[in-house]
Image: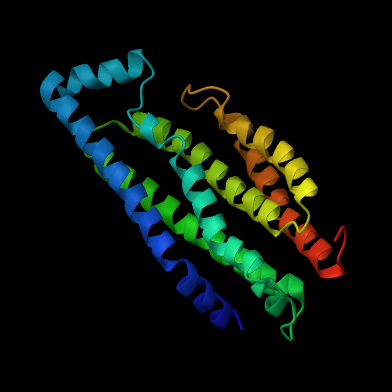
Amino acid sequence: MIKAIFIKEWLKTRLAACLIFVAAVGVVIYLLLALRSTMATSGAVETIATMIGRDMIFVNLMQFLPMLSAICLAVVQWLPEMQLKRIKLTLHLPVPYTQSIGLMLLYGVAVLAVVSVADLALLWAVESLWLPAELIRHTLLTMLTWHIAGLMAYLLVSWIILEPVWRMRVAEMAVAVPLLALFFLTPQPEVYNRFLPLLGLLTVLCGLLPFYSIYRFKTGKGL
């Protein structure tokens, strides 16, 4: 059952998933090349001194990419289910709907997790050749916040798309936007460090919201 659902979701979203992966890795490679070019032009010592003195991490271009990628994946994964009424078939599978929907959500989270790990691992592997460990940690923790925002965006957009009533979707958007805005209140690196556990817990709790929309759909609430 798990394998069948994952294969179905992969066939449906493989193009979007591959584009998200290529875009994320491509942006990281571009940023690494830009950093290397700066170090070659200004000198490694001067570049590192600038990063420390001005609190720069050279990855600000990545700030919104995980969130936009997650929104794209959620739309590609769930919008056809609702528009083409395929979600009704899913809800009539001989398993609890919480299990089938949970596996579909798990697939989306897994795709985004793979992209996040690839981004962070590539950045760590290359920057460890050029920069001190403290600066690398500075960069990775800042990027981790953006990737958590991507996971939350995926869950919130899934919640909204699965909601069967438009007026409720508007209310849910009014909740989702401020939640996501929490991750982007300031561009200062590592400012969210002490809040990462809380933001992670909040993201996990957001994973319950799509089940509420599916429950409303299944029971015909508001239809």
For this view, does 87 lie left or right of residue 32?
right
* Above or below 156: residue 92: below
Q: In the image, residue 202 lies at what x, y percent?
A: 70, 43
Q: Residue 79: in sight, yes or no?
A: yes
Location of the C terminus (image quadrant):
bottom right
For this view, does 125 lie left or right of residue 14?
left
Q: In the image, residue 154 lies at what x, y percent?
A: 58, 51
Residue 38: which quarter of the image? top left
Q: In the image, residue 211 lies at what x, y percent?
A: 76, 61
Q: Residue 121: in sight, yes or no?
A: no
Q: Residue at x 33, y 43 (%)?
A: 124
* Above or below 174: residue 89: below
For this view, does 127 lie left or right of residue 220?
left
Location of the N terminus (image quadrant):
bottom right
Of all residues shown, which one is farthest toward the bottom?
94
Residue 200: which quarter of the image? top right
Residue 184: which quarter of the image? top right
Q: Residue at x 74, y 81 (%)?
A: 92
Q: Which residue is nearer to you in this view: 198 or 101?
A: 101
For this view, does 12 lie left or right of residue 80?
left
Count of numbered marks:
0
Of all residues shown, which one is farthest toward the top?
53
Q: Residue at x 62, y 36 (%)?
A: 180
Q: In the image, residue 186 lies at what x, y percent?
A: 53, 22
Q: Residue at x 42, y 38 (%)?
A: 140
Q: Which residue is nearer to you in this view: 121 or 155?
A: 155
Q: How is the image coloured?
A: rainbow
